[in-house]
Amino acid sequence: MIKTTTALTTLLAFLAAPALAGNTTAPIAEPVIAAPVPLAPRTPNWTGFYAGGQLGYANLDSNSLSGDDGLIGGLVLGYDYDLGNNWVVGGGLDYDFTDIDLGPVSSLEEIFRAKLRAGYKIGNGLLYGTGGYAWADSDNLGSDDGYFIGGGYEHMITQNFSVGGEVLYHQFDNFSAPSGDIDLTTVQARATFRF
């Protein structure tokens, strides 16, 4: 009887072994879904030539001539180089027409600028500082060389069109003998075509 019980127990253990051992095939690993890697925001490439126009307001002060305010506007031309690390450098030329009174019998008629600028990209925009050489001419007091400094913001609407604004402070030290110093502040909106 013990032999029969042992034989029966062994047979049952043998038959049950595969059921208790589990599946003999390797389990299929579930795929791991990785979170998408966020991409850095894409900013426009500012490298290239541009040309356009600007229009705004000018305020003139002088130590020996009476100053006035007036409309100012003209043309812009330049080149920017995108350094690829959020910084942009460039240079340009501005030519503005105006008719601001310089005393009772004269007026400031035109301003030319040769400028350098450097700026930091913010999304589709460029926040920049600028400065350089300025030349101003009047109708009967002659002309004078000076300098200007300032800053602005330009926003790329499309890859070929941008709009912006700029504030510049100009200094002309010898406009009219013996001591005709002129300070000129301009605030202008500008639009440029980029190619």
Image (spheres, rainbow, N blue to C red):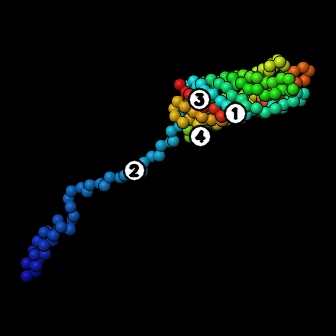
Q: Callout 4: few (<14), some (14-19), or many (20+) C-alpha neighbours within 10 Å?
A: some
Which of the 4 image quadrants contains residue 77?
A: top right
Secondary structure of residue under mark 3: strand
User: What residue is disc 1 on?
Assistant: 56
* Quadrant position of the N terminus in the picture: bottom left
Mark 2 or mark 3, earlier in chain: 2
Q: Nearer the viewer, mark 2 or mark 3?
A: 3
Relative image position of residue 153 (x, y in whole percent): 64, 36
- Please report contact status of discs 4 and 3: CB closer than 8 Å, yes or no: no
Q: Nearer the viewer, residue 143 or 122?
A: 143
- Frontmost of labels 2 and 1 is 1
Residue pushed farthest bottom? 1
Instruction: State yes or no: discs 2 and 4 in contact (Cβ < 8 Å).
Output: no
* Gap in angstroms between the C-alphas marked 2 and 3: 44 Å
* Amino acid identity at mark 3: Thr
Q: Position of 116 compared to 143: left or right?
A: left
At horizontal 73% and vertical 34% (from top left) the residue drawn is 57
Residue that carries the numbered disc 2 in the rendered image: 34
